[in-house]
Amino acid sequence: MSEPPAPPAPRADLPVRVVLRPMGNPLPLGFLALAGGTVLVSGLQLGWLDDADAHTVGLLLIAFVVPLQVVSSVLSFLARDVVAGTGMGILFGTWLAIGLTTLTTPGGTRSAALGTLLVVSAVAMLLPGTAALPAKLVPAAVLLTTSVRFALTASFQLAGGRTLRLAAGGVGLLLGALAVYAALALVHEDARGRTVLPLGRRASGRRAIEGDGADQVDAIVHEAGVRRQI
């Protein structure tokens, strides 16, 4: 009985087409959700909201912040921006944990478990934050300030103290302002097709807006989803 013929060897010269789908920038949505979450938690930390409102804050984090950042993370990965996708993914997981903990514990209660997670989240946010620095200064500042905000909140959860609580709340408000500005700048940039408000774009970040088509796809063959292995 004869053996079946061997399959033909793959040819390196066959043309391959990679189809890209245009989409809107998902970062403004994620940044506005971040602003909502950090301002709500700052309200508790600074005493603007009573401890009795903690359960409502937890519910709002889960209902408003988490879904928007899930969408922003998924669309960022689909848009081939691993920095934005990773940052938004860490954020939605962290806000979900904060929301659930706040919802299920008495108002004003500290949690060592949540504090430990926030330490991990603070370190994790340094990765996309530092990766964004060479390209976009303002989004990088948002991500890095988020790291500081999580670190201060973690310190309060682990050690307590009015000073740490107020510091975390104050940095949270600063983060909210930065996130709103970044979202505003990105929305105007996409709507008008040019930079209107400064975003600190440099190098690859500037080429993403001002470069030609070749600048956008010159290394696409090496991106995850195109190359054989991630």
Image (cartoon, rainbow, N blue to C red):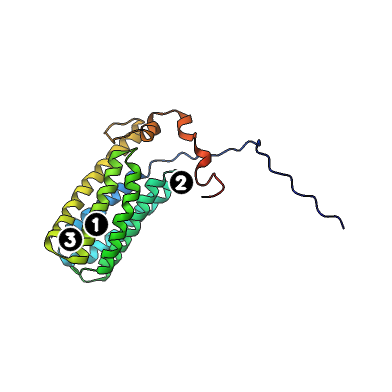
Do the numbered discs 2 and 3 sit on residues whose CB atoms are within 8 Å? no
- Of callouts 3 and 1, the N-terminal one: 3
Question: Splitting the image into 4 quarters, where does residue 79 fall?
Answer: top left
Look at the image and tell me whether residue 162 can be seen: yes
Residue 123 percent location from the top left of the image: 31, 55
Tag 2: residue type?
A: Leu
- Of callouts 1 and 2, the N-terminal one: 2
Question: Splitting the image into 4 quarters, where does residue 56 fall?
Answer: bottom left
Q: Please name the residue shown 32% across and 52% down the image.
A: 125
Tag 3: residue type?
A: Leu
Q: What label does residue 78 carry, if any?
A: 2
Question: As rendered, which of 219 and 60 lies closer to the eye?
Answer: 219
Question: As rendered, which of 18 and 54 lies closer to the eye?
Answer: 18
Q: Please name the residue shown 28% across and 68% down the image.
A: 113
Badge 3 element: helix
Tag 1: residue type?
A: Ala
Residue 80 percent location from the top left of the image: 45, 43
Badge 2 element: helix
Give the distance between the C-alpha atoms of the residues marked 3 and 1, in whole angstroms: 17 Å
Q: Which residue is mark 1?
A: 151
Q: What label does residue 207 carry, if any?
A: none
Give the distance between the C-alpha atoms of the residues marked 2 and 3, in whole angstroms: 35 Å
Q: Please name the residue shown 35% across and 44% down the image.
A: 131
Residue 2 percent location from the top left of the image: 86, 55
In this rendering, which labeled residue sits more in front, label 1 or label 2? Answer: 1
Could you tell me which quadrant the N terminus lies in? bottom right
In this rendering, which labeled residue sits more in front, label 3 or label 1? Answer: 1
Look at the image and tell me whether residue 183 can be seen: no
Compared with residue 22, is residue 33 higher up or lower down, i.e. above or below? Answer: below
Q: What label does residue 44 carry, if any?
A: 3
Residue 167 percent location from the top left of the image: 15, 55
